[in-house]
């Protein structure tokens, strides 16, 4: 470790060191908690940011892990302080956890800014928690390390491996088609989530934790350790130790989150099979570091990066536990070779190349070499056209390949309630060529862009054995979802994007190889419909929702609040003490 910071330069020393009235107040109040001078003199104060709550099953072990992180901080000569923030419980938060990602990021940034903190360990993993924590910490700029919550154990029912989300959708389609009974469905319910930890498919949670490692923001391999593995506790303690050293080294996030590491993070995302949600979060995270990442960059990297992680839902067979046993993310990064910039600095203080030098791939069916990928290019594609001038996203790797090019008539639903009526109607007149459209489900319309984009297959098609069709919306979909679902249509319909103008029966044309998405309507017809279009009433007139809808940006910009982008206005001053 190269110490570049002197004890008197610690940020916390501004609170604790001066011989004045205010600092006496801080010291006396620290003593009220049982501290003494050994706790504040010349020691970095490390915030352990905890997203634990009794309603966050994926983070249920973080109250315990905080103790391991603190042990590491103490071992390295720091002073740990545990600070609770919003818990980002994907399953329980309504209307959608995405509504609260930016609020959480704001909370993290301001919690760090307003307290005597020198360095940070962020603990999270359930979907939005990773981007929220990283976005807030990047904006604040203190040295930080991300401690991934880790995935839960593989699911199990009747001797069959179950994957989070993915198998729920699958069995639900079977239940609606009448091929499994209530008892079997209940068995799936009890077997799908068997331990604490995040979803164990390569859904949004695992993708985002891998992306954090791809940025160089975690210890090597940390993102792949299953939550219940004893190695997870050891990793937690190592995060605590490392955070203390990072303060002394003044290893701030601007030295880690760069263009080069952002490209690495995107490459890793594509090679993992990547949840579609990752696109929005990657853009938002990069922009917090002042890096203007766009959908075009993502599509370009996607074109040249094959999917190597054979993990569901993109892969057919394996789950995160298998990925860990096969060598985890370091092994995958090693396979990516010179597709990554190995010269970037990570939280270890070493280069990425040094940190993965000894990584090994123990199972080349789980982590495929470049010569035998799961899918020949990155799992995501960005489409543009008169229906999505600012872009839309699809995951061709996880759909029936016959939809690569498609032309069919639209069936349009203006709300989820209307959609449900259509998909539950066995006699609804439709063919497998129809395109099921849901609108008013974007960042403002949803609100918060709920995960409604994997529109359930209509009963009218299910009964004839169909299991995929083209679906189109301005919503997101869960990272564990699959199917020919076009998502994130921007601008969204609620603010008058072209999606607002289409009608049932209009012909939709999608061409994934050429990256286009159009409605077959003349400019004149579209202009006439636009003139007739009436803006819907605002969703919120007060409260957080009002703030959200006044400031949220569209999906292609990462759905951040405009005023939270790090390049918005001048830097925020340090607090007066
Ligand atoms: Fe938390 Fe899936 S619900 S990661
Ligand atoms: Mg999810």
Image: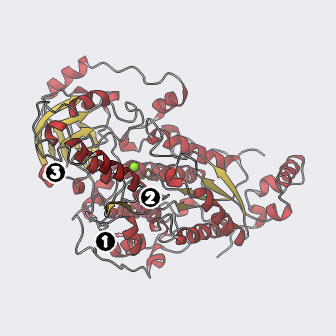
Dot 1 crowding, Cα within 10 Å, few <14, some 14–19, many 20+: many
Q: Secondary structure at mark 1?
A: loop
Q: Are marks 1 and 3 in contact (CB under 8 Å)?
A: no
Q: Which mark is residue 366?
A: 1
Q: Residue furthest front?
A: 183
Q: Secondary structure at mark 3?
A: loop
The residue at 90%/54% (across/down) is 19
Number of numbered discs overlaid on the protein picture: 3
* Relative to 389, 92 lies left or right: right
Say which of 353 and 361 sits in front: 361
Q: Which residue is mark 3?
A: 514
Say which of 445 and 480 sits in front: 480
Q: Are marks 2 and 3 in contact (CB under 8 Å)?
A: no
Nearer to us: label 2 or label 3: 2
The residue at 90%/47% (across/down) is 21
Q: Is residue 354 above or below residue 290?
A: below
Dot 3 crowding, Cα within 10 Å, few <14, some 14–19, many 20+: few
Q: CA distance from mark 2 to mark 3?
A: 43 Å
* Residue 76 shows in this picture: no
Nearer to us: label 1 or label 3: 1
Q: Residue 114: percent from the left, percent from the top?
A: 69, 46
Q: Is residue 537 above or below residue 500?
A: above
Q: Is residue 508 above or below residue 151?
A: above
Nearer to us: label 2 or label 1: 2
Q: Which residue is mark 2?
A: 194
* Relative to 496, 348 lies left or right: right
Q: Residue 229: percent from the left, percent from the top?
A: 50, 69
Q: Earlier in the sequence, mark 2 or mark 1?
A: 2
């Amino acid at each position: 470790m190269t110490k570049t910071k002197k004890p008197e330069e610690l940020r916390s020393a501004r609170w604790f060191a001066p011989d004045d009235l205010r600092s006496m107040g801080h010291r006396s109040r620290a003593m009220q908690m049982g501290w003494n001078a050994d706790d504040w003199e010349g020691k970095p104060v490390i915030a352990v940011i905890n997203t634990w709550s009794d309603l966050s099953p994926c983070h249920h072990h973080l109250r315990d892990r905080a103790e391991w992180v603190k042990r590491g901080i103490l071992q390295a000569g720091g002073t740990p302080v545990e600070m609770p923030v919003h818990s980002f419980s994907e399953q329980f938060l309504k209307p959608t956890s995405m509504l609260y990602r930016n609020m959480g990021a704001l909370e993290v940034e301001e919690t760090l800014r307003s307290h005597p903190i020198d360095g940070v360990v962020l603990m999270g993993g359930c979907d939005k928690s990773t981007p929220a924590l990283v976005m807030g910490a990047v904006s604040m700029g203190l040295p930080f390390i991300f401690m991934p919550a880790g995935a839960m154990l593989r699911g199990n029912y009747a001797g069959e491996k179950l994957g989070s989300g993915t198998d729920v959708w699958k069995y639900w389609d079977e239940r609606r088609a009448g091929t499994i009974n209530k008892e079997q469905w209940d068995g799936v319910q009890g077997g799908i989530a068997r331990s604490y930890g995040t979803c164990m498919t390569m859904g949004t949670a695992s993708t985002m934790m891998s992306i954090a490692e791809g940025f160089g923001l975690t210890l090597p391999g940390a993102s792949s350790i299953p939550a219940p593995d004893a190695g997870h506790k050891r990793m937690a303690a190592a995060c605590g130790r490392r955070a203390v050293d990072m303060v002394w080294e003044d290893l701030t996030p601007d030295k880690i989150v760069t263009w080069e590491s952002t490209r690495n993070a995107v490459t890793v995302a594509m090679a993992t099979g990547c949840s579609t949600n990752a696109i929005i979060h990657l853009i938002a995270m990069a922009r917090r570091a002042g890096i203007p990442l766009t959908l075009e960059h993502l599509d370009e990297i996607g074109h040249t990066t094959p999917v190597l992680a054979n993990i569901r839902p993109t892969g057919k067979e394996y789950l995160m536990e298998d990925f860990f046993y096969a060598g985890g993310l370091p092994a995958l990064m090693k396979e990516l070779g010179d597709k990554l910039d190995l010269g970037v600095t990570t939280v270890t203080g070493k280069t990425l190349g040094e940190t993965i030098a000894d990584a090994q791939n123990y199972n080349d069916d789980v982590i495929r070499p470049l010569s035998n990928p799961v899918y020949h290019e990155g799992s995501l594609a960005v489409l543009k056209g008169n229906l999505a001038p600012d872009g839309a996203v699809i995951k061709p790797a996880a759909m029936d390949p016959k939809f690569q090019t498609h032309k069919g008539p639209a069936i349009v639903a203006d709300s989820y309630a209307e959609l449900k009526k259509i998909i539950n109607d066995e006699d609804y007149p439709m063919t497998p060529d129809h395109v099921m459209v849901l609108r008013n489900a974007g960042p403002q319309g949803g609100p918060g862009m709920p995960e409604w984009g994997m529109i359930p297959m209509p009963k009218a098609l299910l009964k004839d054995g169909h299991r995929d069709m083209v679906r189109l919306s301005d919503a997101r979909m869960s990272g564990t979802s699959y199917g020919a679902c076009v998502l994130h249509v921007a601008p969204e319909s609620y603010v008058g994007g072209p999606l607002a103008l289409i009608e049932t029966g209009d012909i939709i044309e999608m061409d994934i190889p050429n990256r286009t998405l159009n409605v077959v309507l003349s400019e004149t017809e579209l202009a006439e419909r636009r003139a007739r279009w009436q803006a819907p009433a605002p969703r919120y007139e007060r409260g957080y929702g009002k703030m959200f809808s006044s400031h949220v940006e569209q999906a292609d910009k990462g759905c951040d609040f405009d005023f939270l982008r790090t390049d918005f206005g001048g830097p925020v001053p340090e607090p007066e003490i």
